[in-house]
Image (spheres, rainbow, N blue to C red):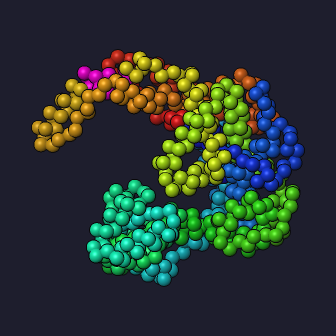
Amino acid sequence: MKKYFLATAAVATTLFLGACSNKNEIGMSVPNGNEKFITSDAGNITKQQVFDKMVSEAGLSALLDLVDYDVLSQQYEIDQTEVDKIIDQYKEKNQNFDEFLVTQGFKDEAELRQYIELSLYRQKVADELAVVTDEDLEAAYAKSYEIGARHILVADEETAKEIIKKLDEAEDKEATFQELAKEYGTDGTKDNGGDLGTFSQGQMVSEFEDAAYALELGTYTKEPVKTQFGYHVIYKYFEGEKQPFEDIKDELTEKVRAQKVSNESFIAALAQKREEAGFTLMNDFLEDQYLEVSETYEKSKESSQSVVAKINDHEYTVEQLYNELVPAYGLSDGISLIDGKLLEKKYPVDKKAIKELIDQFKVAYGTNYYAAMAQNGLNNDDEIYEYFKLAHLQDAALAEAYPITDEMLQKLYDEKYGEAAQAQNEEEAESTDAEGTTEEQTEVKSFDEVKDELESLARQQEYTQLRLETLLIKFRSEANFKFADETLQKRYETIVANIEEQAAAEEAARNAQPTDEQTPVETNQETAE
């Protein structure tokens, strides 16, 4: 049962920037873990290495797929003709259905069927949540108007309390609030006095929303409001009018239904179903993650080297978890591991440059840096470093294969700042002046002043994701890269063929571009940066 489908029509991304994991931290040994998962002249990757990586990124979700299928299939019935209809739709959209199954990570149609069945079982849970009561509508109506608020976001409760104390002592509360926002605020609203504009129910996280709606107009929170982003002090400066209940009843009903089946509610409902079935985890690594999902789960005192989890009448082994993970994640995680080996053999690792890159992100995200990294699966400094190291090495590979020349930069300079560009700017300025409006003209700058900007633009145009993937495919081929599992190898070869076909089309389009006095065609591919 796979957690997602890959896009067959687009570039099949292989998650080159994956996080690494620690075997001791995960605490599970896959049977025959020393067997080769990938072979190459640059070194081999073992089953255990791939398992550790897969578990760190997707182990819990894969395990819950197994558990939910068993638990929910005992509580609900689904219409198998609906499953047949969905499979038929996939067959209609994909003439080569067998190739579709291979590309998406399913070994056969039966496995696809099980994936669809799990989705339908979970939909049954969502349908139960979607029932809207009169009490639900009454609570929603109480917040059925817009409000306007300012906030000051800080990293710790002590600072928030210090801000509240200064507001208590101030005569002009709102003016003081704006000044304190500029002084203490850590997000993008601070320069605007913390102004969040107007918003309605459901647009803010629940803790913030509840506190903001509870305020009287022209007042602020007397206690810090904690959310996933930090600690807030909130000031309410606007309160809209309520419409008659009957006029907005249908709208409120849909809004409440959507909130009831929100990710948070849905996850909680599934957790309750599992725990009613005696769900128990015997692995600390996965248990710590699950405790963040479920407020009702009680930490187990049991542990096992071979059993990961159990419900009342079934146990789930490490081997089962490995087999569940490999089809969906084995290819991408295996490739991520081998690419690190290949690139480190070809290019030097500049630790100073990597640290500078990480520092740029720390400055950009401020106190939310680690939360932002965690959202991308990077949970500690070691994982973050490995992520950016791989990005740095990929950048080196692209720079060698597609060097940015002075001729490229001069051409870009002429297009943006040359005589033709300035003439066009002047013409546009005259046109806007004639219409009674003003528009700032592009300032004429020297080549040296804008060289860094031009290099960045050139990299965006030259360093496409397709080019990166094609390079890495070439490196793997040169190192006699091969999956030990025939199904994964076949899937890899299918994806490679798709990538190479798209890469050839991209290069043909690039080479067909006019080169004189015309703007290059922009690429839609993601940059490798």
**On the picture, is 280 further left or further right than 61?**
right
Q: Is residue 9 visible?
A: no
Say which quarter of the image contains residue 349.
top right
**On the picture, is 474 further left or further right than 322?**
left
Residue 446 rendering spot, x and y as whole percentages: 31, 25
Residue 222 rendering spot, x and y as whole percentages: 42, 77
Count of labels in the image: 0
Q: Is residue 251 above or below residue 329?
A: below
Say which quarter of the image contains residue 218.
bottom left
Q: Residue at x 53, y 44 (%)?
A: 359
The overriding secondary structure of the stretch rendered in magenta is helix
**On the picture, is 426 further left or further right than 84?**
left
**Towards the viewer: 167 or 416:** 167
**On the picture, is 122 further left or further right than 208?**
right
Q: Residue at x 78, y 72 (%)?
A: 278
**Towards the viewer: 361 or 9:** 361
Q: Is residue 427 above or below residue 336?
A: above
Residue 239 rendering spot, x and y as whole percentages: 31, 74
Range of residues picked out in magenta: 411-421
Residue 416 in the magenta stretch? The answer is yes
Q: Residue at x 39, y 31 (%)?
A: 453
Q: Is residue 245 above or below residue 439?
A: below
Residue 442 rendering spot, x and y as whole percentages: 26, 33
Q: Residue at x 63, y 43 (%)?
A: 385
Residue 150 in the magenta stretch? The answer is no
Q: Is residue 281 visible?
A: yes
